[in-house]
């Protein structure tokens, strides 16, 4: 089977990380592109598994070396996709999943127009607001800022191939798995494996 590239983005607070983890847990053949970042690791994050954590100097060197296929600066930190992952994906060895924000997704589309681009969004602004309030501890002004940002991020949804509304984790994971299965069943992807039996 030819390799398939999946690019997943999501509005903040849509539960993208949890969904991506659930997808990977049920599908070990899907490899995760490990980005470089200058942000410090969060509790539980492992260098080389969640991200390659580097200094700003190291990140600058990666840019100069041409080692990154795309990068962004957001929330005060740099994030970038290693060229190695794209090369591996394009050589067709393995299905690869990229978790990047919208600018990264658009840059990856230039390299992999055949990729499958998926956007995760929360059910409605009201549900998102309730989720943020339930978590507590967010000052009202910050909460309103976040809601405004999510509304803006969601405007990019129509650019993607597929939308997954994360109303319920189990259901959303199932829909994401269905997208992956359908993508792998596309003739240009599956036929190279089947054709030797039929020639
Ligand atoms: P976090 O700091 O929460 O792990 O990630 C923040 C945002 O950066 C997420 O939207 C994630 O998709 C995005 N991101 C992570 N790695 C990359 C990357 O290599 N390139 C781009 N463009 N975005 C990334």
Image: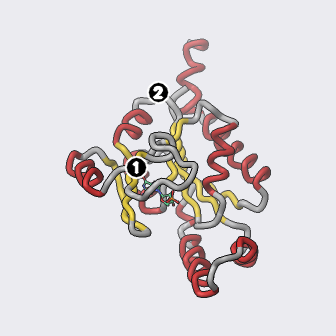
Residue 195 vs residue 173: left or right?
A: left
Residue at horizontal 58 percent and vertical 77 percent from the top:
146
Q: Residue at x 47, y 27 (%)?
A: 93
Position of residue 85 measured from the top left corner of the image (x, y, whole percent): 41, 39
Q: What is the number of the mark on residue 136?
A: none
Residue at (48%, 60%) from the top-left corner? 101
Question: Which of the two marks, 1 or 2, is nearer to us in this view?
Answer: 1
- At label 2, counting other C-alpha atoms closer than 10 Å, the crowd grade (few under 14, some 14-19, many 20 or more) is few
- Residue 106 figure quarter: bottom left
Q: Is residue 5 visible?
A: no
Residue 64 position within the rendered picture, expressed as x and y whole percent measured from the top left: 20, 50
Q: Secondary structure at mark 1?
A: strand
Residue 93 circle label: 2
Q: Which part of the image, by quadrant, shows the C terminus? A: top right
Q: Residue at x 44, y 35 (%)?
A: 89
Name the element at disc 2. Answer: loop
What separation in Å lies between label 1 and label 2 (alpha carbons)?
Answer: 26 Å
How many numbered discs sit on the rendered protein? 2
Scheme of image coloration: secondary structure
- In this view of the protein, which residue sits in the foreground, 155 or 192? 155
Rendered location of residue 168, percent (x, y): 78, 58
Residue furthest out toward the front = 43
Q: Identify the disc placed on residue 53.
A: 1
Earlier residue among tags 1 and 2:
1
Q: Quadrant of the N terminus?
A: top right
Left or right: 148, with 87 as reference point: right
* 19 versus 26 height, above or below: below
The picture places residue 163, in percent across and down from the top left corner, at 64, 58
Q: Is residue 76 above or below residue 53?
A: below
């Amino acid at each position: 089977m030819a390799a398939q590239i999946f690019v997943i983005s999501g509005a903040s607070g849509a539960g993208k990380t949890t969904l991506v983890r659930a997808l990977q847990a049920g599908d070990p053949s899907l490899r995760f592109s490990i980005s470089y970042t200058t942000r410090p690791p969060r509790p539980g994050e492992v260098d080389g598994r969640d991200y390659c954590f580097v200094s700003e100097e190291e990140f600058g060197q990666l840019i100069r070396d041409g080692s990154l296929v795309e990068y962004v600066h957001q929330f005060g930190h740099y994030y970038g996709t290693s060229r190695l992952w794209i090369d591996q994906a394009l050589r067709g060895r393995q299905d690869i999943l990229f978790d990047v924000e919208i600018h990264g997704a658009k840059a990856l589309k230039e390299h992999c127009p055949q990729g499958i681009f998926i956007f995760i969004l929360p059910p409605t602004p009201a549900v998102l607001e309730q989720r943020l309030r339930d978590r507590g501890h967010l000052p009202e002004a910050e909460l309103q800022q976040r809601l405004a940002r999510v509304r803006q991020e969601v405007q990019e949804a129509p650019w993607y191939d597929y939308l997954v509304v994360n109303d319920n984790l189990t259901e959303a994971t199932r829909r994401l798995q269905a997208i992956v299965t359908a993508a792998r069943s596309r003739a240009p992807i599956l036929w190279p494996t089947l054709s030797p039996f039929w020639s």
